[in-house]
Image (cartoon, grey):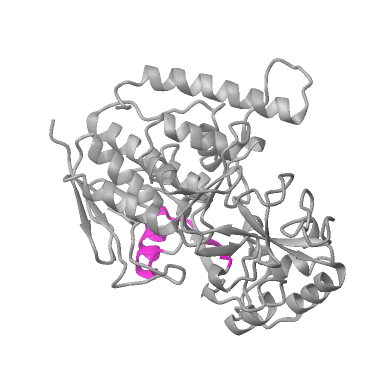
Amino acid sequence: MAYERVTVIGGGLAGSECACQLADRGVAVRLFEMRPSQMSPAHHTDHLAELVCSNSFKSTRPDSAAGLLKQELRSMGSVLMSCADRAAVPAGGALAVDRGQFSQEVEAEVESRPLIEVVREEAVDIPSGPVVIAAGPLCSPSLSQRVLSLVGGDALSFFDAAAPIVDASTLDMDVLFTQSRYGEEGTGDYLNAPLNREEYEAFIEALISAERVVLKDFERKDLFQACQPAEEVARTGIDAIRFGAMKPVGLTDPRTGKRPWAAVQLRAENADHSAYNLVGFQTNLTFGEQKRVFRMIPGLENAEFFRYGVMHRNTFVDSPHVLDRSFCVPGTSVRLAGQITGTEGYAEAVASGLLAALNTYADLAGLPRVELPRTSAFGSLVAYATDPATQGYQPMHVNFGIIPPLEDGKRRSKRDRYAAYAERATRDLSVYIKNRGDLFC
């Protein structure tokens, strides 16, 4: 059966997943990506599916919401989750990837599908026919205006930030030590920079007094909670970061045999361990101040920076009030996918691209649209993002707080409750996939 060609705008996580899924179902796709002719404030390359913030897809634990979502995506045949698994680097209980390899894996998947035509130019208008706009929260101003005119709602926005990446060869390994929290010293997937109390307090003082790149309309309420700049966290109290990104719990400094007062963890950016990012240190400091302040961290005195931290404005639409449950703009053949819908996070972006593909294919083939079980992590995220009763809509990571409570009334510990959520979600989604053989390959 010949289907109408679909236009997918944006070659990020959502757009790449969407294009691959449509092509696998016999649908021709024109995938627009504006880079390199038009770069965004956050991207550094012209590669598809470039990860602009952290290189971590978060937890792999099946009894965590993030781990459960990834498990669900794999069960639904996600192409990009397979790419992430192949590009994985050691990160303890998280799925972190080599950014370069991950993009290469995604591009290879796209190129292997002759039904996908990649168009390297900016899409300034929304074409006729079925369209998926997955341009991310940093789509060009002209396209943003077209989207806002189409949905008829107001633009919402928040500030997002990324952490700096340093050259591993410039780190002092006589000071840094390898250990994952609660693991044995010398083993684990993180480097740790230990600070004593005096070093920590001097670092915090420098961090909160350093010069920032601050926009005139910047306000604390505009910050997305999960990506708050380190200096903003530090400003809330002297020990705020010590109980957060710099918590020393479960670590032992081999130089003293004791737990340090605080510690900065560094996670490998690639399989060669030639670059590390400063975990939890997304920042809005000027580049010069980043070099000065972060070199105060023991072991980083001579660190060279492959990339400085950056901060940028992300835009998203009021999805619960302008999109239907399939992320379609009512009365049109246009869907939105990715962070522009307010589904915040890498796996969440992949999920929205998969959902857009399935629903677009269902429309083309005359099939019922997707109705994921509300009890699944994926289904609960979709339900939250499309519930008209939601007020004050803000970007949302998948979490157990948006999943319906268990119905048996048993009192459980948090760990047992989350495990029960995961067991129920896996069971219900498995039944749904089995019953929708018309959608799933």
Side of 202 relative to 88 (left or right): right
Residue 419 in the image: x percent, y percent?
Answer: 65, 26
Residue at 72% across / 77% down in the picture?
296
Side of 111 relative to 100 (left or right): left
Segment tinted magenta in the rendering: 139-163
Q: Residue furthest top?
A: 408
Q: Quadrant of the C terminus?
A: top left
Q: Quadrant of the N terminus?
A: top left
Instruction: Tell me if residue 162 is in the magenta stretch.
Output: yes
Residue at 17% across / 44% down in the picture?
115
Residue 100 in the image: x percent, y percent?
Answer: 39, 59
Q: Is residue 101 visible?
A: yes
Foreground residue, 421 or 88?
88
Side of 120 relative to 348 (left or right): left
Residue 355 in the image: x percent, y percent?
Answer: 39, 38
Residue at 79% across / 20% down in the picture?
411
- Give the vertical position of 18 relative to 306 (above or below): above
- Give the vertical position of 73 relative to 233 (above or below): above
Foreground residue, 175 or 120?
175
Side of 82 relative to 178 (left or right): left
Foreground residue, 17 or 317?
17
Q: Residue furthest left?
A: 2
Q: Is residue 166 visible?
A: no
- Give the vertical position of 292 relative to 46 (above or below): below
